[in-house]
């Protein structure tokens, strides 16, 4: 940005950038770590969403991978915590619809599909929303009747 300013001297811009780097103001690794931890702790995002955030911010790939490696390996726990917090929002819906909604919310937060489905199923089960809430319809759509 400094170099793109009209009438800016390149030597002064380089000196200023070097000074900011020395002070730690321009540190991609620290910035990536801060962004990653914020996304995980405050927003409850999964690794995929964190990686996308780092990519959009222009963090070099090797630095982004290092920041992701430092994250706690608790995607399943965080996904379940998020699903528990959102399960009230799907109350009243049929089980399959509630499962799709919760799993979709988790997927948009960057959790892998297997983690999202497991967390959604567990949260629904804990909330007492089970397949019995499907209003008596068979889950497969196939109905068997006895022969007479």
Image (cartoon, helix red, strand yellow):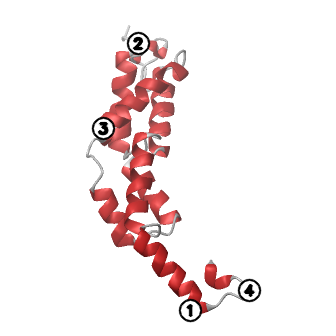
Quadrant of image for the N terminus: bottom right
Residue occupied by mark 4? 6
Tell me the CA gap for discs 2 and 1: 72 Å
Residue 131 in which image quadrant: top left
Residue sitting at x 38%, y 7%: 148
- Which tag, 4 or 1, sits closer to the chain's start? 4
Left or right: 34 in relation to 1: left
- Local SS, label 2: helix
- Crowdedness of circle 1 by 10 Å Cα count: few (<14), some, many (20+)? few
- Which tag, 2 or 1, sits closer to the chain's start? 1
- Local SS, label 3: helix
Residue occupied by mark 3? 76
Residue occupied by mark 1? 11
Residue 110 appears in view: no
Give coordinates of residue 73: x percent, y percent.
25, 46
Q: Nearer the viewer, residue 128 or 110?
A: 110
- Local SS, label 4: loop
User: Do the residues under discs 2 and 4 have CB atoms within 8 angstroms?
Assistant: no
Tell me the CA gap for discs 4 and 1: 14 Å
- Crowdedness of circle 3 by 10 Å Cα count: few (<14), some, many (20+)? some
Asked if 122 appears above or below 136 in the picture, the reply is below
Residue occupied by mark 2? 132
Asked if 2 appears above or below 23 in the picture, the reply is below
Tell me the CA gap for discs 3 and 2: 26 Å
Give coordinates of residue 97: x percent, y percent.
51, 27
User: Do the residues under discs 1 and 3 have CB atoms within 8 angstroms?
Assistant: no
State the count of labels. Answer: 4
Tell me the CA gap for discs 2 and 4: 69 Å
Q: Nearer the viewer, residue 8 or 141?
A: 8
């Amino acid at each position: 940005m400094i170099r793109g300013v009209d009438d800016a001297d390149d030597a002064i811009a380089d000196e200023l950038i070097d000074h900011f780097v020395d002070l730690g103001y321009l540190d991609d690794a620290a910035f990536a770590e801060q962004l990653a931890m914020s996304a995980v702790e405050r927003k409850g995002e999964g690794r995929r969403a964190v990686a996308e955030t780092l990519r959009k911010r222009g963090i070099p790939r090797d630095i982004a991978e290092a920041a992701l490696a430092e994250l706690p390996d608790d995607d399943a726990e965080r996904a379940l915590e998020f699903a528990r917090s959102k399960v009230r929002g799907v109350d009243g819906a049929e089980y399959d619809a509630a499962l799709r909604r919760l799993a979709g919310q988790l997927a948009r937060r960057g959790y892998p599909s297997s983690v999202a489905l497991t967390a959604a199923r567990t949260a629904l089960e804990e909330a007492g929303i089970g397949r019995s809430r499907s209003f008596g319809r068979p889950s497969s759509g196939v109905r068997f009747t006895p022969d007479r």
